């Protein structure tokens, strides 16, 4: 059964992410909105509620990390972590520089940069099952490479 076309796609002729590629101000609007939620509520709760999760991570890749807000907060809280903010090239080219965070452009459907741990927030809900499986398989591949398997 095919679901109906999402309202944004019906109105603009393409999905929200494809639309954002061509309109810099719209892309910034999306990234700023997502960063607001990450910085105000989500990441501080993670830092406070389960800091032990990051004890063994020497490096952390944030897949779909947008402007790097979430990863920047994590690296400031856990300064031993080397952060890799990974998102589409047109997104990370506007990401702010943050101590301990490298901004890397790429496509999560192709590969994910190697790191000790993967952080994925506000990403999978945007995709169907097949796309989510692809993203998670790419994350697993990078983890297996990191572990030498």
Image: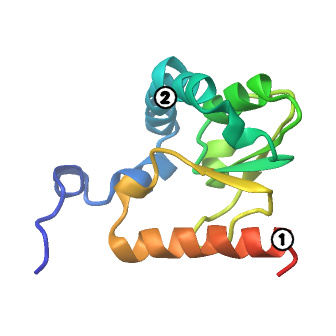
The percent position of residue 10, horizontal first and vertical second, equals 17, 57
Which one is nearer the viewer's eye here, 64 or 27?
64
Q: Is residue 129 left or right of residue 137?
A: left
Question: Would you name the residue on which mark 2 appears?
Answer: 42
State the separation of the CA atoms marked 2 and 1: 28 Å
Q: Residue at x 51, y 75 (%)?
A: 134
**Residue 46: assigned label:** none
Q: Nearer the viewer, residue 104 or 115?
A: 115
Picture coordinates of residue 71 (x, y %)?
68, 35
Q: Secondary structure at mark 1?
A: loop
Density class for disc 2 (Cα within 10 Å; few <14, some 14-19, many ≥20) is some
In-image side of 148 versus 29 (left or right): right
Does any portion of residue 93 appear in the rendered image?
Answer: no
Is mark 2 in CB contact (under 8 Å) with mark 1?
Answer: no
Within 10 angstroms of label 1, few (less than 14), some, or many (20 or more) residues? few
Q: Residue at x 60, y 22 (%)?
A: 48
Q: Is residue 128 above or below residue 51?
A: below
Q: Nearer the viewer, residue 128 or 147?
A: 147
| Chosen colour scheme | rainbow
Q: Based on the displayed image, in which of its 4 quarters is residue 103 positioned?
A: top right
- Residue 125 at least partly seen: yes
Question: Looking at the image, is mark 2 or mark 1 earlier in the sequence?
Answer: 2
Mark nearer the viewer, 2 or 1:
1
Q: Dot 2 lies on which element?
A: helix
105 vs 130: above or below = above
Q: Is residue 8 left or right of residue 65?
A: left
Residue 147: mark: 1
Task: Tell me where residue 86 appears, x and y as whole percent.
Answer: 68, 51
Q: Quadrant of the C terminus?
A: bottom right
**Which quadrant of the figure has residue 9?**
bottom left
């Amino acid at each position: 059964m095919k679901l109906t076309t999402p309202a944004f796609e019906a109105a603009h002729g393409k999905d929200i992410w494809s639309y954002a590629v061509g309109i810099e101000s719209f892309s910034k609007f999306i990234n700023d909105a997502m960063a607001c939620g990450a910085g105000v509520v989500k990441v501080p709760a993670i830092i406070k509620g389960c800091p032990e999760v990051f004890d063994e991570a020497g490096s952390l890749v944030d897949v779909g990390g947008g402007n790097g807000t979430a990863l920047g907060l994590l690296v400031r809280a856990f300064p031993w972590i080397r952060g890799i903010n990974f998102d589409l090239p047109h997104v990370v080219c506007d990401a702010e520089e943050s101590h301990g965070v490298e901004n890397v452009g790429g496509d999560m459907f192709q590969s994910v940069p190697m790191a000790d741990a993967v952080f994925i927030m506000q990403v999978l809900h945007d995709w169907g099952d097949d796309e989510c499986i692809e993203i998670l398989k790419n994350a697993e591949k990078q983890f297996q490479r990191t572990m030498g398997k």
